[in-house]
Amino acid sequence: MSDSFATRDQLSVNGQTYTIFSLDKLGQRYDISRLPYSMKILLENLLRCEDGVSVTKSSIEAVAQWDAKKEPDTEIAFMPARVVLQDFTGVPCVVDLAAMRDAVVKLGGSAANINPLIPSELVIDHSVQVDSFGKASSLDENGQIEFARNGERYSFLRWGQKAFNNFKVVPPNTGIVHQVNLENLARVVVERDIDGVRYAFPDSVFGTDSHTTMINGIGVLGWGVGGIEAEAAMLGQPSSMLIPQVVGFKLTGKLPEGATATDLVLTVTQMLRKHGVVGKFVEFFGDGLDHLPLADRATIANMAPEYGATCGIFPIDGESLNYLRLSGRDEALIALVEAYAKAQGLWRTDAEAEYSAVLHLDMAEVKPSLAGPKRPQDRVLLTDMKDNANTALAAFAEARAKKNADATGAVKAVINGSETEMKDGAVVIAAITSCTNTSNPAVMLGAGLLARKAAARGLKPAPWVKTSLGPGSLVVTDYLKKADVLKDLESMGFFVVGYGCTTCIGNSGPLPEDVSKAIAAGDLTVASVLSGNRNFEGRVHAEVKMNYLASPPLVVAYALAGTVNIDLSREPLGKDADGKDVFLKDIWPSNQEISDAIAASIGPDMFKKNYADVFKGDSRWNQIASPEGESFAWSDASTYIKNPPYFDGMTMSVGSIDDIHGARVLGLFGDSITTDHISPAGNIKASSPAGQYLQARGVKPVDFNSYGSRRGNDDVMVRGTFANIRIKNLMLGGEEGGNTIHYPSNDKLAIYDAAMRYKAEGVPLVVIAGKEYGTGSSRDWAAKGTTLLGVKAVIAESFERIHRSNLVGMGVLPLQFLDGESAASHGLKGDERFAVTGLQDGAGKIADVTATSPDGSVKAFKAKVLLLTPKEVEYFRHGGILHYVLRQLASRKAA
């Protein structure tokens, strides 16, 4: 380690001496007291990682002299303390590491060089689906199905846990990755021996899931990255980034009666989306934090991807220590966190830092809200929900009338043996799910207390509602039991179905057959209400077109109402045993009732008990056989785990960034194309290219599992790229489904089939899109699948941060239309041949794009080349970040 500014110092805590890199010493040269909390963490990271190559003296000076108003233009290298993965994104990471072990040997290196160099922990939380619900046996039944479906994947992960150093797996039925991270894995301040010296430094984390930002709630700087960038960090490669702007968000006051942390975060999300914080840090401050429990902070931090920020961080303070103590952390760690934070100027004070911009919210003004019907930033006041639902339903009804004039929006049905009538707007899924809210005792116990009051009045959910409770950790179930409200939730149909993301990730499972038939018979537009963070089109369930995010108590309320076409602030939920109307206000628990329940039901012993053997797993996990050995024994028979083709034919020679000629358009898309659209995680249709591939391999449709579960097999995933049932290719007039037109034949084909035909013809491809391309989860397969289809460039009006980075990491060039320009403004139809020139081996910042129409006319325009740092240019020359890292490791001696 270099130490250009002589900041190496000692800190003694409880008889232990630690080496630290003192921000106070640096502050004798620069005024760093004005820096935001998050900028100080970046600065410490640079001081500690200074090596004269990736991190230089000038890098440190640039952050120390940070100009809050300056547009980002200075590159720094950030090295996280650890990596956390979930299994959907983690399996392909481990597949890539296994493939790199094979490839590095072929390049003349040592397989022993391919090991995580920093702690890397994978939590299996994305695989459980809601197949069984509404009964006490649902948890066990879903667990049995989960292990039967995923035995091959789990065997592979057990091999990885044994084969790789610094790699641990948290087995299924433990909790959701972000909640486990918050409740147990987070260090807040890290102790680590390096070359015989004991260091202390801020915890920081890269996670292969967008909502890694939840950990910002306890003062840990971390954000979601694609699996590609995570793998590079695991292998010791710092992440290249521009010094960000930091938006301050001042919170004052406290939440009023009847408002929840969910309502608060939906309000914050709407405000920050409107302001525009993509690529920026957001930092929360103000005296409102005095009234904001750690769980509420984590809720706000969790949804940073929804408001578009890289992170949404809270500084360390007394509430952070309270939470560490509540969650059963060791007193020695708590003492270190306090001493280190105060010594380094990382402890929250009343002084306001310099920010690039400041927003303000008086929490007393927060009102009950939902978000939907298809984007998390589209907040809807509870009082406006009926109007919002009616507007959406009217649009769906208009579209339906064009193809089905006889549909009335209602249908008679027999559900659970009883005759009933289902209508447009029916809530068919009500799910208490997702890390955002299941980590928050106030809203979870609030849901339980509401269920208790509803049960006392004799209310029941509508018969067509599929109810589910997916606690984010075992601790949640314990405190629901101790508060004696779990039985009340069960009386409303909310039985525990599993410990994982479930409905929020699209693992909602099939609707009951009676309900599914009714939807089809009436061509109904139905809804889900979930306590999640994502409600994009086609994500929750293929048969559900409207999806609303809500607090857990409101999820229970809408299950009782059975429809989103209702004003719960004025209309009754139902009638009690005496025939009297029951309104939401009649059963809504008070803030005092919720506080009393929290105080009486939650303590450190719960956390200590449930996390005592967090990596051990249950009998099902420990009975799984797994292969041995340094290298993985790939099986050609596997449809889950396959050696990917990224390194086929690779040599030690580095390539160049060449212009593109003669490219065809694979897809022409509009705004807000999400990573769910590009690489769906849900069901695999039997008629899709992926479904046909699996059937040809002898897999029956009932055993398809999901796209997310098969991310370890590139043959499945490349066929699933752009295969979302709701994606609209404008080359086909906006028709839904993953199809395109092949030119010049004019054949309509599945996107995968067209791409393979183009590949056989030697034709490169481009994708054209509108604003916010790649919004949503940090899904590396959205970039991997794109490159395997033969796409050389994506031209969009704007990109979401992580997806742009992932495209670069997989060797796909992101190009951005100039401001105010678009595919429509240039009259692009998708039948043109494209050329992209002026790239100058990565030196060109503006490319020339020409589109030649079939009639020979040419449309020419310029586009920004979004290779944002010299490091990204270097990665791109190598063919991607993994190729770059592999060449570096192949040139080293055995570890």
Image (cartoon, helix red, strand yellow):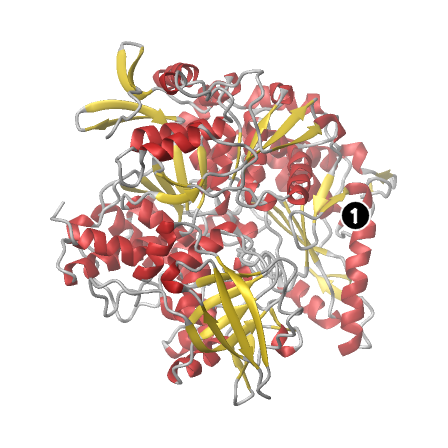
Q: Is residue 846 visible?
A: yes
Count of picture labels: 1
Residue at 58% x, 58% y is: 539
Q: Residue 91 vs residue 803: left or right?
A: left
Identify the residue position indicated by label 1 in the image.
385
Tag 1, which secondary structure? helix
Q: Is residue 628 visible?
A: no
What is the x, y in percent for residue 819?
A: 62, 57
In what quadrant of the picture does the N terminus appear? top left
In what quadrant of the picture does the C terminus appear? top left
Residue 355, picture quadrant? top right
Q: Is residue 649 above or below residue 495?
A: below
Q: Nearer the viewer, residue 282 or 304?
A: 282
Q: Amino acid at mark 1?
A: Met
What is the x, y in percent for residue 731?
A: 61, 77
Residue 487, picture quadrant? top right
What is the x, y in percent for residue 148?
A: 39, 58
Q: Is residue 131 above or below residue 123?
A: below
What is the x, y in percent for residue 207?
A: 42, 43
Q: Nearer the viewer, residue 684 or 273?
A: 273
Q: Nearer the viewer, residue 20 or 101?
A: 20
Q: Residues within 10 Å of mark 1 (few under 14, many from 20)?
A: many
Q: Residue 236 vs residue 435: left or right?
A: left
